[in-house]
Amino acid sequence: MGTIAVYPGSFDPITNGHLDVIRRATKMFDRVYVAVARNAEKTPLFSVAERVALAKQSMRGWPRVVVDDFEGLLVRYARRVGARVVIRGLRAVSDFEFEFQMALMNRRLDPAIETIFLMPKDEYTFLSSRVVKEVAGLGGDVSSFVPRIVESALCQKLGVRRKGGV
């Protein structure tokens, strides 16, 4: 089968920054599992089923990507799907400390699973799902930050109209 990687996240919603990291990961690994996390401690805007569906639609035609959901320890999920690599995105130095701690914990839980950090293109370093939701909720244009299907879902969920510009 080759090398399998897991890219976990809440993806609430998936952004062009996420897609950039996934696209680049598919050039390095034979299969990439985009693992949508079920986290009882968070209150996402979109349900797990909606986040999975939006991710699948955003990556339609990407044959080496599997979109799935998971709950519990990431290393258990990685073992279950045969992954030996976890991909984490780093946008800024502020992300590093948390991600580094998580990578060390995952290594402690399963030393056979490596963590690889990928940075998105410069144009996406400021982008986060939280910021996208905030801008969309205030009626701002998020069309350059998310796929069209996600923009439509955000507008519908938040009860706002699409805006052409600021």
Image (cartoon, helix red, strand yellow):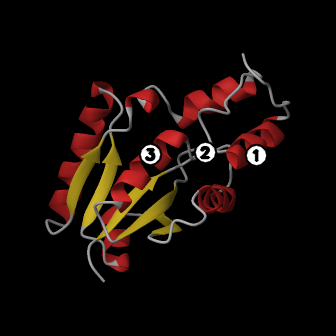
> Element type at marker 1?
helix
- Circle 2 or circle 3, nearest the eye: 3
Judge whether 140 appears above or below 162 on screen: above
Question: What residue occupies the far bottom of the structure in this picture?
Answer: 1
> What's the distance in space between the residues labelled 1 and 2, CA to CA?
9 Å
Quarter of the image containing the C terminus?
Answer: top right
Determine whether label 3 and label 1 are within 8 Å by CB. Answer: no
User: Residue 26 at x, y = what percent?
Assistant: 37, 61
Residue identifier under label 2:
13
Q: Amino acid type of disc 3?
A: Asp
Q: Earlier in the sequence, mark 1 or mark 2?
A: 2
Residue identifier under label 3:
20
Q: Amino acid type of disc 1?
A: Ala
Residue at image coords 69%, 46%: 150
Q: Amino acid type of disc 2?
A: Pro
Residue at image coords 65%, 60%: 57
User: Residue 37 at x, y = what percent?
Assistant: 50, 57
Residue identifier under label 1:
153
User: Residue 97 at x, y = what percent?
Assistant: 24, 33
Q: Earlier in the sequence, mark 3 or mark 1?
A: 3
Residue at image coords 71%, 25%: 141
Q: Would you say 57 lies left or right of 164 here?
A: left
- Circle 3 or circle 1, nearest the eye: 3
Quarter of the image containing the N terminus?
Answer: bottom left
> Element type at marker 2?
loop
> What's the distance in space between the residues labelled 3 and 1, CA to CA?
20 Å
Near mark 3 (Cα within 10 A), the count class, few <14, some 14-19 or many ≥20, is: some
Determine whether label 1 and label 2 are within 8 Å by CB. Answer: yes
Near mark 1 (Cα within 10 A), the count class, few <14, some 14-19 or many ≥20, is: some
Q: Would you say 163 lies left or right of 136 here?
A: right
